[in-house]
Image (cartoon, rainbow, N blue to C red):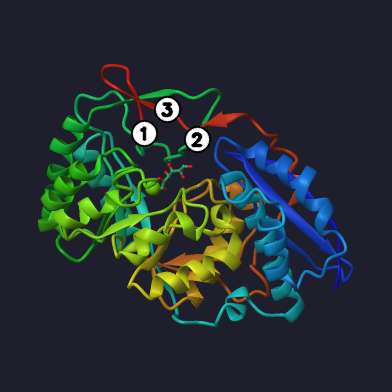
Amino acid sequence: MKITNAFVNITSPGRNFVTLKIETDEGIFGLGDGTLNGRELAVASYLTEHVLPCIIGRDPFQSEDIWQYLYRGAYWRRGPVTMAAIGAVDVALWDIKGKALNTPVYNLLGGKSRDGLLAYAHCTGKDIDHTLEDVALHKEMGFKAVRVQSGIPGLSTTYGIAKGTGRYEPAERGLPSEHQWSTEMYLRHVPQLFARVRETFGEELHLLHDCHHRLTPIEAGRLGKELEPFHLFWMEDPTPAELQEGFKIIRQHTTTPIAVGEVFNTIWDAHDLIRNQFIDYIRMTPVHSGGLTHLKKVADFAELYHVRTGCHGATDMSPVTIAAALHFDTAVHNFGIQELMPHTDETNAVFPHQYRFKDGMMFPGDAPGLGVDLDEALAAKYPYLRAYLPINRKLDGTLTDW
Ligand code: GCO
Ligand code: MG
């Protein structure tokens, strides 16, 4: 089998997505996702100008060799743009292989290790009462795990909170907006939020929380310690992770489990965190970490250190990435949980897919390959619109971490 053609599709059915389609001489095609929130066109151009011409004529079954060719061969390694581009190619190749062998991708990664995948929803509200309502709604929908976020009294904006009654969408059309931040207000508020959630819903519901890189390690240690009575499933992205040894300080102060890695691109971003057992869950997902080929290696390495997976699944992971993540989750031994932030109806129509949610669990479906399609005619109706993540400033105006 040979790759005969490859092209990038950019569409914006509610938000921007960059999709790679690789075609072969046997009429089988594969899809990959290269969406990088707020930097979409950089990946599209990297693929079109620098990657796709090099893969025409290659055998799509050689996913390992093609991965190494694009990673080692380019000399310039790592980084979100490079790894999203490699990820798009790699996932499309696994899709082709599955279709050619008439089997779902999870069978190529080791086969079923479980029947269903525990998924968590993102629950938000402008204050604690509204957040409790959202948690109740998601419990009703069948969720057994929820990530709980709430507006912070005194701050006009808080990350991760839906606007009005709409769904939460991290990217905003136009140039970046500005959010406000106060660590003091946040640290006072979050333990009260979790006290109310446990009081209302009891012990059984799995509770998660995303700190979105806002804290220093010692502040994260304090928060983790104060949240211990509420038995969190995880505390996510407590501090930026470029300084991996910072997580040692968090570990010294709390038994609240730690998850990190949605912005990581390769094992080298997580290597020390994993081997020193500073974290409990690794959040890397196929699109931003070089596809299934690399992510499988990360998971196998993490397994040695009792670290489980928790793939990032916000709306900026297209249905192609969600499907790839679900096949990966199904196969790896050390699966932990899968994030599920629902796409708009428009997005679901552009990317018809086999995966399903039922009773708190997700299922990849048994279609050959990934089980996702791209309706190109419908996609063409939603042209790209510039969008960014917001930026974040402390109350005195200092730019801080998003
Ligand atoms: C999550 C995330 C998102 C990110 C977004 C960035 O855990 O779902 O933190 O909400 O902000 O995916 O592109
Ligand atoms: Mg997050």
Q: Say whether mark 1 is within 8 Å of ligand 1.
A: no
Quickly name the residue at label 3: 391
The alpha-carbon separation of the residues under discs 1 and 3 comes to 8 Å
Q: In the figure, is residue 74 to the left or right of 244?
A: right
Indicate the secondary structure of the residue bearing disc 1: loop
Viewer-proximal residue, 94 or 350? 94
| Residue 257 placement: quadrant | bottom left
Mark 1 or 3, nearer chain start: 3
Q: Position of residue 266 (x, y in %)?
A: 52, 57
Confirm or reject: label 2 Cβ below 8 Å from ligand 1: yes
Q: CA distance from mark 1 to mark 2?
A: 16 Å
Image marks 1 and 2: residues in contact by CB distance under 8 Å: no
Choose between 51 and 35: the one closer to the eye. 51
Q: Label 1 belongs to which residue?
A: 401
**How dense is the environment of label 2, judged by Cα within 10 Å: few (below 14), some, or many (20 and up)?**
some
Q: Check the picture and name the quadrant holding the N terminus.
A: bottom right
What residue is disc 2 on? 171
Task: Rate crowding at label 3 as few (under 14), some (14 to 19) or many (20 or more) other CA atoms within 10 Å.
Answer: some
Q: CA distance from mark 2 to mark 3?
A: 11 Å
